[in-house]
Every structure is written in structure tokens, then in C-alpha cells.
Image: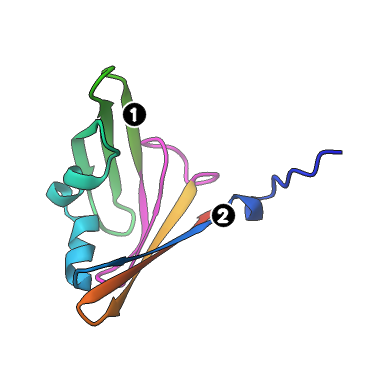
């Protein structure tokens, strides 16, 4: 008997991370092109061709390139909610992909004195 749950609820997860940085600095790391290009890729991969229009309805796109093979991974999405320093909601997938069926990422920044908790639940719409 197959008991695999393929409902959208089964495809959700969450991440909580505490940064030793104020909320404003963490917000900039997620919303400024120069900052994002420095970290928004795994080790051994570079992020070139970075474009982020952080506003509701704005789009982002970037292409990651594997340093060893040259293989490229285009990524993009649309900003659905932008509440500066508090919350950022965007789709995550192929550039220009329809919103329907694309993963949605929600970032919530919670101040903890000079530190910041970043809470990221995911959901499919």
C-alpha cells in the first residue's frame, strides 16, 4: 500500500534562523541587489545577471552558474507583499513562471534586541 501524501499540505516546511545583526541589516541583505548577489547562491556557484525590483508586483531574476561545469540555473519570481523591515512575500521558481503552482516564500523579520529572528514558512498557491 502506498501511503505517500502528495497534498499541498505535505509540501510545506519552515525555517527559523537567528542572525547576530539588526533587522534593518537583514532586510537589506534580502532586498538590495549588491547584497543578494554576494550570498544568494550555494558554494561553488556564482550569481550573475542579478535584477531585483522589490515592490508589490515587481519581479526578480538571477542566473546561478556552476563554477566547475558552466551549467546555468535561472531563477525568478514576483513580489506579492512588501512590508519594509517586517515581511517579504514572493514566488520562487523559473523566471516568468505563472504564479499558480509556484512555491511562495514568506520572510518575517522579528527583532530580538540587536539580533533578528528570520522565520520562513513555505506554501504552494
Residue for point 43% across, 37% down: 97
Q: Are marks 1 and 2 in contact (CB under 8 Å)?
A: no
Q: Is residue 53 above or below residue 21?
A: above
- Between 33 and 21, the residue placed more toward the observer is 21
Query: In what element is the residue under mark 1?
Result: strand
- Judge left or right: residue 41 versus residue 92: left
Classify mark 1: residues with Cα within 10 Å, few (<14), some (14-19) or many (20+): few
Q: Is residue 72 above or below residue 8?
A: above
Across and down, in percent, residue 50 comes to 20, 39
Residue 34 placement, left or right of 91 = left
Q: Which residues are magenta?
A: 77-102
- Residue 21 position in % (x across, y down): 19, 69
The residue tagged 2 is 12
The quarter of the rendered structure image containing the N terminus is top right
State the residue position of label 1: 73
Q: Residue at x 55, y 44 (%)?
A: 101
Q: Is residue 107 above or below residue 116?
A: above
Front residue of 43/11: it is 43
Asked if residue 43 is among those painted magenta in the image, a careful observer would answer no
Local crowd at mark 2 within 10 Å, few (<14), some, or many (≥20)? few
| Residue 67 quadrant | top left
Q: Is residue 33 above or below residue 107?
A: above
Residue 95 covered by magenta stretch = yes
Q: Position of residue 24 (x, y in %)?
A: 18, 70
Q: Residue at x 49, y 48 (%)?
A: 103
Q: Residue furthest bottom?
A: 113
User: Which residue is found at the position 17% from the left and 45% from the top?
Assistant: 38
Amino acid at each position: 500500500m502506498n501511503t505517500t501524501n502528495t497534498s499541498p499540505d505535505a509540501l510545506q516546511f519552515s525555517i527559523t534562523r537567528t542572525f547576530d545583526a539588526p533587522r534593518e541589516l537583514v532586510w537589506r541583505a534580502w532586498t538590495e541587489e549588491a547584497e543578494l548577489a554576494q550570498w544568494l547562491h550555494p558554494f561553488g556557484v556564482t550569481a550573475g545577471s542579478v535584477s531585483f525590483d522589490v515592490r508589490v508586483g515587481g519581479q526578480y531574476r538571477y542566473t546561478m552558474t556552476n563554477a566547475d561545469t558552466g551549467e546555468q540555473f535561472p531563477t525568478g519570481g514576483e513580489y506579492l507583499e512588501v512590508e519594509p523591515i517586517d515581511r517579504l512575500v514572493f514566488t520562487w521558481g523559473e523566471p516568468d513562471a505563472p504564479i499558480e503552482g509556484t512555491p511562495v516564500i514568506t520572510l518575517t523579520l522579528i527583532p530580538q534586541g540587536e539580533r533578528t529572528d528570520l522565520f520562513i514558512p513555505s506554501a504552494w498557491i
